[in-house]
Amino acid sequence: MQKQQLLYKGKAKSVYETDDNDFLILHFRDDTSAFNGERVEQLARKGQVNNRFNAFIMQKLSEAGIETHFEKQLSDNEVLVKRLEMIPVECVVRNFAAGSLVRRLGLEEGQALTPPTFELFFKDDALGDPMVNESLSITLGWATAEQLEEMKRLTYQVNEVLKAMFEVGDLMLVDFKLEFGVYHGRIVLGDEFSPDGCRIWDKTTKKKLDKDRFRQSLGDVIEAYEEVAQRIGVPLD
Ligand code: ADP
Ligand code: UDP
């Protein structure tokens, strides 16, 4: 598969076309951003840690019967993926309260959410990724009711698979964000699953081991990502 021109440079990854219209190459960069791109820093090793982390998780999800865009890890920073027509709605599941939910509803951080909640956000940096609902998503043409139903079902299924996986490493999967797209008519999991797009805490100490270390300037960001990787068995070299 030949890498061709740059299609899109996102906040964390660059997307390249290939000589096959059905596939793209994602390049994970070291850029780390927060607050919708307001703050950006380079964190050494982040690209390769997230690329390996994501490859490991996507393969586990695929083994659990969830179709993903992952095809093959090509190099330290690059992965070959199916080219999806992305749905511009982010799916968030929460097992414990944190982040925007705490700010919005004044909940206590760490409060258990039973059953886990499911939220939708419109993917739009300029608008700050506002919260939306199914009705808006359908009326505004972002997805059909059937697609949204499938995205919700798959997001909850991912939650069950990953909660169990993190539990083995004495870790809490607090919340996470997924993006889906359409591939030959099917809803397929795209983008990435890495500590950039989820919250993971140590079960005993509640130490934050995800991107909140960057957002809240807690230090040792990539060291924390590597610790999570090591605890759940992601091969880092
Ligand atoms: P952002 O766009 O939020 O800044 P990234 O820097 O991660 O995010 O850029 C990657 C972009 O590639 C995202 O817009 C994401 O929706 C898109 N993307 C991820 N996987 C695929 C795929 N398989 N096919 C097409 N686009 C994808
Ligand atoms: N998230 C993400 N990208 C976004 C927004 C959220 O990956 O554009 C993730 C975030 O890392 C967290 C979950 O989705 O794991 C829920 O985020 P929240 O709504 O609490 O927003 P935040 O506090 O991060 O602004």
Image: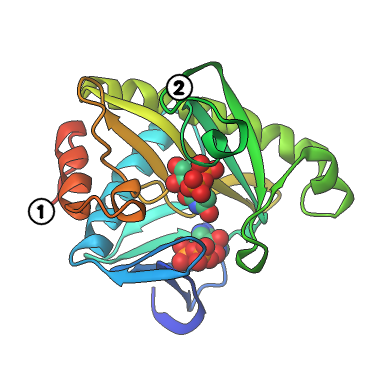
Kindly give the residue lying farthest to the front in the view shown. Answer: 106
Residue 15 in the image, given as x and y percentages of width and height: 46, 72
Q: Is residue 190 visible?
A: no
Q: Residue at x 54, y 41 (%)?
A: 100
Q: Is residue 60 left or right of residue 143?
A: left
Q: Position of residue 48 (x, y in %)?
A: 23, 61
Q: Which mark is residue 198?
A: none
Position of 235 with respect to 61 (left or right) is left
Question: Residue, x 19% and y 45% (percent of image)?
Answer: 224
Query: How many C-alpha atoms fall within 10 Å of the one at disc 2: few (<14), some, or many (≥20)?
Result: few
Give the residue type at disc 1.
Answer: Asp
User: How is colour applied across the structure in the image?
Assistant: rainbow
Residue 28: x and y in percent read: 34, 66
Residue 129 visible in this rendered orientation of the protein: yes
Q: Say above or below: 22 vs 184.
A: below
* Rendered view: 174 above or below 68: above
Q: Which residue is mark 2?
A: 160
